[in-house]
Amino acid sequence: MKNELITILFLLTAAFFMPLSGAVFAPEWDLDSTVKDKGSIRRIVERYPQGDVVHVFDRVKGKILRTFPEEKSRRKVECRMFYRKDGRLEKVATFIDGKLICTENGIYDDAGILRGIRRVDAQNKDMISTTMLVYDENSGRLKMYGIQTPQGVVDYYNEYDKKGNLVFVKGYFRNKFNAGARYVHDSNGLIKEVFRLNSRMQNAGILKNEYLLDGNGNWIEKKSLFYKTLKQKPIFAETVTRKIEYFK
């Protein structure tokens, strides 16, 4: 069970090589402020070499289900989204072959603003949680949040450009810079380049993305290359395609 949970935590974080650092919780919480797909989407199938990631949407609520194969056994993993009466995401429950593994619960204040996320296992025992979510008073964008780990609290700080694109994530552990990432966006707001930074603020890897868009402006193909340095050949290459179905 321990190895199984570790695998799930990795998949929820990485989602098959997601470029955003600090995405400890399910991406549906949008802690990384990624660009939203446009239009009334019913279903998205993302084809990765490791297997398909399927996103299912409700016309009103938004995303209600995400499925993907477990990394080694290829068993089916389901992440189900549940919403409050006011339309905000209430919890994300993760299942393997129909068996509950863990649940992430949103913590809201009286104004309905998300202030924390708490992940518990199937026995409702704490696994990991945020300590606090702080928003910019003017833009309302997420400015800072802390992740409670067994080793201590890791604080993440987000920085944005004038268009609202996330351009920097900095992680601090025990008040010392631990790791980070710098982002470059294309004209559509999609992430074109990611520069991963080590504890010395030096480049630890560079990810480059190229996109093909559909008629609604959503990407349907992404070619990714990961370099240790740009002077060397890429050490990782991947092409992901997406089939997007829209509500009529």
Image: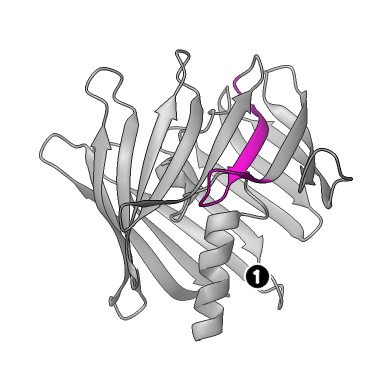
> Magenta region: which residues?
189-204
Residue 98 appears in the picture as rendered: no
Colour mode? Answer: one colour
Residue at x 58% of width, y 23% of height: 38
Residue drawn at (56%, 50%) of the image? 198
Image coordinates for residue 225, horizontal then vertical, percent: 80, 42
Queried whether the magenta region covers residue 190, the answer comes back as yes
Residue type marked 1: Glu
According to the picture, the residue beneath numbered tag 1 turns out to be 70
Above or below, comparing residue 191 to residue 78 in the picture = above
- Looking at the image, the residue that sits furthest to the front is 200
Q: x, y (%) of residue 211?
A: 77, 28
* Residue at the image position 40 percent from the left and 45 percent from the top: 29
**Toward the viewer: 12 or 47?**
12
Q: Position of residue 23 (x, y in %)?
A: 48, 50
Res 231 quadrant in image: top right
Q: Along the line of sight, which residue is nearer the eye, 210 or 68?
A: 210
Q: Quadrant of residue 44?
A: top right
